[in-house]
Image (cartoon, grey):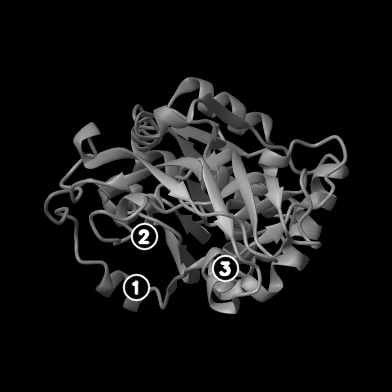
Amino acid sequence: MVKAKKWILATKFDGEPKNSNFKLEEEDLPALKDGEFICDAVYLSVDPYMRVHTFPVGMCVIGEQVARVTESKSKDYPVGRLVQLYAGWRSRTLVDPTKPKDMEAIQLLKVPDLGTLEPSLALGILGMPGMTAYFGFLEICQPKVGETVLVNGAAGAVGSAVGQIAKIKGCKVIGFAGSKEKCDWVKSLGFDHVFNYKEADISKSLKEAAPDGIDCYFDNVGGDFTAKALQHMNLFGRISICGGISIYNATKPPLTPDPFMTILSKQLKVEGFMVTRWLAKYPEGKAEMKKGIDEGKIKYRETIKDGFENMPQIFMSLLKGANIGKMIVKA
């Protein structure tokens, strides 16, 4: 038997996650059968969606990882091969590539040769967050040259990529982030206007930066910020709803103005999305993002923290804004 560790959800979240919500368990992995392999986590992803995704108590906490094959009876997955899969917060995973339903659930992929780039990027700018930015912005907002784009959570893995894509498309970009360090980095990415939402008056800042209004809004935050941003949208503006991190830990609904009359009067297009909608198009998106990196048009940052045993603490720090760019755990 091979030993493995996993973090399970011990109790349901109620408000901000706490240590008691998580429990570290050991499990025995059975002997390999023909076609199977075992992989050890190298990098694990922590993401805001994990806070609001519903999964039962006792289940392994969900999430994606890059892992290295350490034992194998599969000719397609030899020892040493790097893979990425939705195995959750597990240190070691047994995979059977011959079971289509299981493979669909974990979305197993071989990590491509990234040259001098770190394989952790498969969890960030060249993975789900990058695809969220690429498709969630381009497909829903459909930006045009000269338009004004607003991005909140602009120092995060998704928001920072959205702003850079918007600049490549010839747009003016306004970003909001939560510290001087974050704002300085966002400015270095080429955003035209950057504000610290903890210090600036949101409405006044938007009026100053976008006197002619906002055409596209990529929303990672929700809540009061979005209620204010709606008032600055232009007629026929487009809004891509990616997340609502400002209210993920709320124990009761936020008190914000009803948005629907504003949406009606401005004839706005507002669309929420799950990035897996474009799963079949990921190769296209990854190729474009890699091209942008290679050409120096797309920049990224990673906040890498050590220790599988520290997964809950690192996840909780993410929800409090401890990351710049993508938060990654090195196992």
The amino acid on which the numbered mark 1 sits, given as a three-letter code, is Ile
How many angstroms separate mark 1 from mark 3 (CA)?
15 Å
Of residue 215 and residue 132, the one placed in the foreground of this image is 132
The amino acid on which the numbered mark 2 sits, given as a three-letter code, is Leu
Image coords of residue 90 (percent x, y):
47, 45
Q: Mark 2 touching mark 1, by CB under 8 A?
A: yes
The amino acid on which the numbered mark 3 sits, given as a three-letter code, is Cys
Indicate the secondary structure of the residue bearing disc 2. Answer: helix
Which residue does the numbered mark 3 point to in the structure image? Answer: 141
Question: Is residue 243 among what the camera can see?
Answer: yes
Which mark is first along the chain, 3 or 1?
Answer: 3
Which mark is first along the chain, 2 or 3?
Answer: 3
Determine which quarter of the picture holds residue 19: top left
Horizontally, residue 204 falls left or right of residue 125, namely: left
Indicate the secondary structure of the residue bearing disc 1. Answer: helix
Of residue 149 and residue 328, the one placed in the foreground of this image is 328
In this view, the residue farthest toward the top is 181
Which residue does the numbered mark 2 point to in the structure image? Answer: 230
Tell me if mark 1 has few (under 14), some (14-19) or many (20+) residues whose alpha carbon lies within 10 angstroms of its own: some
Tell me if mark 3 has few (under 14), some (14-19) or many (20+) residues whose alpha carbon lies within 10 angstroms of its own: many
How many angstroms separate mark 2 from mark 1 (CA)?
8 Å
Q: Is residue 6 above or below residue 226?
A: above
Question: Is residue 126 among what the camera can see?
Answer: no
Q: Mark 1 touching mark 3, by CB under 8 A?
A: no
Which residue does the numbered mark 1 point to in the structure image? Answer: 263
Which mark is first along the chain, 1 or 2?
Answer: 2
